[in-house]
Amino acid sequence: MSLDPTTFETIVPSRYITFTFPKPLSSHHLRVSVLDSPSSSAARIAAMWVPPGRESDWIFSTFSGHLQLLLSSTTAHHLSRLILIGNPPVHSHPISYFSTPYPSSNQSKETEEKLRPLLLALTPKSAFYQKGICNNEFPEIPFLIYEDEVTGCAILEICEGPCAGEMLIENVVVETNSTKEFRRRLRFKRMPNLVQTQMRILPKNELNSRELDNLEFVIDNNVLVHPYLSPMVGGLSVIAPHLESRIKGGIRPKALCLGIGGGALLGFLSSQLNFDVTGVENDEVVLQVAKKYFGLESNELIHLIVGDGIELVEKLAKNITADCKFDMIMVDLDSSDATLGVSAPPLGFVTKSVLLAAREVLCELGVLIINVIPSSKLFFKRLISEFDEVFEELYEIDVGNGENFVLIATLSKIENDLNACEYSLLNKLKSVSGSYISTIQKISRSAEQEFCK
């Protein structure tokens, strides 16, 4: 079926079109996918090469992955249209791969020049009349390169859950600063650019094969490699004296974790800090994956519940007794709304009624620690405002990846000076999250108001 040449003259919010096109300097074809932003904005266009070998990855082969690429673009201005160009996927589902280098700079430039008439044809009319574009000039269409630390991937399983939808479990090779590490990851198709869980894995035998599929691994529970988990654990330092008092009194601190994923946080709190942990996950298949691939076990220190975490907190708040209250609530829930891009927590959590319920479930010196990926300044403003009405003090940790930060909310005023305190637990937390503990910042009313202007 041929495309109408006028199809791309205007921006149509969330329109997604794919087609094939003859590849310049080759007898093969390219897959071209065009996505318009869900929100209206000036016509700003960019193209992106799909990394060779990764054409079947959900990041590049699905609407949701394409949308996240558009929304997370680092271009100077928000994009209204992102065009993905690459080889046609060989399979309809993600497959194992080892990264193939992009074509040489000269070859890429030659191909880009050959594709320029196509890109101009895919450019909306309004882009030709924007300020700064003179007569006989064409709008600039930058070519973006997708880069991450993954150099190889072996798909272990693709399955589907009633709430999370399709998901995949993969072993990947990650290379940073010439250092190679193996990790096991969980990703959802509805938001494939967001890694739900990753844990370090260690090869059982000597590495003698480049094929990841042929290697056997064991899970390493001693470290947290997911970017925001160490800061979340470090956030416990604000109530270190309380937790230390519990431990010295022979009482295990109690943690309630909303959102389990692969269970990396639950396993660490239990095995490394000896906490009593209750985890809540709304998808039973995700729990099965956590047990099968990430070493999560239900035992006397780890209690697993299938259900909605927000609903559970509201239910507990109505009849919980003082001796059953938790010392900490750890929240790792992301929004399922792909149009918001990667964001956390879901809007349903950022309400006064839910936060009041969470407060009721915590003990007097308890703390709520939450992974936050703000979709906008307006979202951040609402989140801080709601938390500020319910909790005594707010603190934050910037994870430093340009995306996450950890919000820490306490029921009581914190009197201790961490720099002047020495506790066994605090020293253990510093060994895990030392650099983050030193960056904990209290959120003052004036700072909040200044941020939200």
Image (spheres, rainbow, N blue to C red):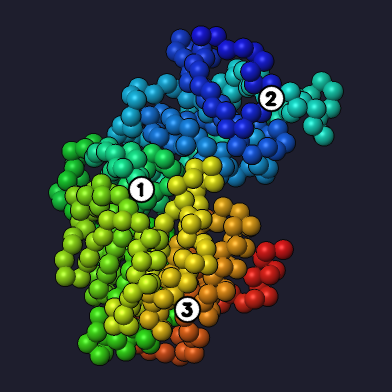
| Mark 1 residue element | strand
Q: Where is residue 81, by image quadrant?
A: top right
Instruction: Say above or below: 23 vs 322.
Output: above
Residue 421 is at least partly visible in this image: yes
Left or right of 425 in this view: 349: right
Q: Amino acid at mark 1?
A: Val
Circle 1 residue = 174
- Mark 3 Cα shell of 10 Å, populated few (<14), some (14-19), many (≥20): many
Which of the numbered marks, if any, corresponds to residue 10? 2
Q: Nearer the viewer, residue 296 or 148?
A: 296
Which corner quadrant holds the C terminus?
bottom right
Spot the residue most to the front: 318
Q: What is the crowding at mark 1: few (fewer than 14 residues within 10 Å), some, or many (at least 20)?
A: some
Q: Alpha-carbon distance for marks 2 and 1? A: 40 Å
Q: Earlier in the sequence, mark 1 or mark 3?
A: 1
Q: Position of residue 215 (x, y in %)?
A: 18, 42
- In the image, residue 365 sits, relative to residue 130, either above or below, namely below
Q: Is residue 114 above or below residue 441?
A: above
Q: Are marks 2 and 3 in contact (CB under 8 Å)?
A: no
Choose between 316 and 114: the one closer to the eye: 316
The relative height of residue 228 versus residue 411 in the rendered view (above or below) is above
Percent x, y for residue 210?
25, 37
For residue 166, which numbered disc appears in the image?
A: none
67 relative to 214 in the view: left or right: right
Q: Position of residue 145 (x, y in %)?
A: 53, 36
